[in-house]
Image (cartoon, rainbow, N blue to C red):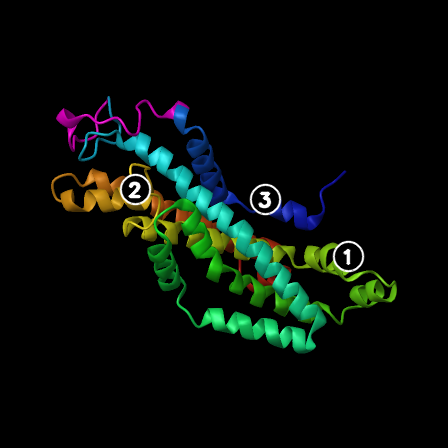
Amino acid sequence: MAASPPLRRLLAAPGWAGWFLVAVAVAAAAAPWLAFHDPAAIDLPGCLAAPSAHHWLGQDRLGRDLLARLLFGGRISLLVGVTTVVVTASVGAMVGLVAGWLGGWVDEVLMRITDCFLAFPGILLAIAFTAATGPGVGHVILALSLIGWVGYARLIRGQVLALRESDFMAAATGLGLSLPRLLLRHLLPSVAAPLTVEATFGFAYAVLAESSLSFLGLGAPPPTPTWGGLLNAGRADLLVAPHVTTFPGVAIFLTVVAAVHLGDRLRDRLDPHHEAMVPHP
């Protein structure tokens, strides 16, 4: 069976950004096999050693292999990013679907709740929550999910308001379908494209926020390696051993840029109106 035009656009969309993220995910998943050293093994004689044939990315202040810690740290960043996106997109999409379709006082109540969450700066709320509950991956995910769903809710509500008066939704309503079936079988597939695009931007934000919290000591507790934690551990030795902070910083930068670039490509591919407005070389 031939793929539909939206599916063909989706399969052709990833580009270098999508394949880079796949490579990062594979490297993180295969960290126990790709890392030649134990990420927690201390080697004090090799303190702050530069990259070499034995330690490709060098060693940190305690002589631990930086490549191994970078690979295992990627697991934390990707876990937080993917889990946060799944939670926030699910909650936000459901709130947006219900608010946009039912309207009236339901829409008013849900949107006022959304406005209350939007009044708080996201990263500051996450810092306050993790500072109060203590460091930990689960606390980071919960902190980022507290505020992350509001963007999805606003986006999906706007999409549903535009679709509510369409002919196919009028036909579905005329058939007497139940509310869950209307929302999940008819509306949700229609807003899947903008939801997917928003999810890629949400993933980039989650990775960056997790790195920021870990840098502040509010992420996964030591000795668990995280990209933000590696940055924090190497900042005191930035002038004498720049490799300790350079490689984690590059990993964070490339992952976030790739996720944002992937979101741009998906938007261009999945939104025919936007694609028609953008000149191509």
Looking at the image, residue 60 sits to the left or right of residue 92; the answer is left
Image quadrant where residue 179 sits: bottom right
Q: Residue, x 43% and y 56% (percent of image)?
A: 143
| Residue in front for this viewpoint, 13 or 204 | 204
Q: Which mark is residue 181?
A: 1
Looking at the image, residue 107 sits to the left or right of residue 251; the answer is right
Q: x, y (%) of residue 40?
A: 28, 29
| Residues at marks 3 and 2, CA–CA distance in whole angstroms | 30 Å
Q: Which residue is mark 3?
A: 12
Locate the N terminus by quadrant: top right
- Which amino acid lies under the numbered mark 1 shown in the image of this protein? Arg
Q: Compared with residue 130, is residue 38 higher up or lower down, i.e. above or below?
A: above
Q: Is residue 45 magenta?
A: yes
The residue furthest right is: 175
Q: x, y (%) of residue 263?
A: 51, 53
Disc 2 secondary structure class: helix
Q: Residues within 10 Å of mark 1 (few under 14, many from 20)?
A: few
Upstream in sequence: badge 3 or badge 2? 3
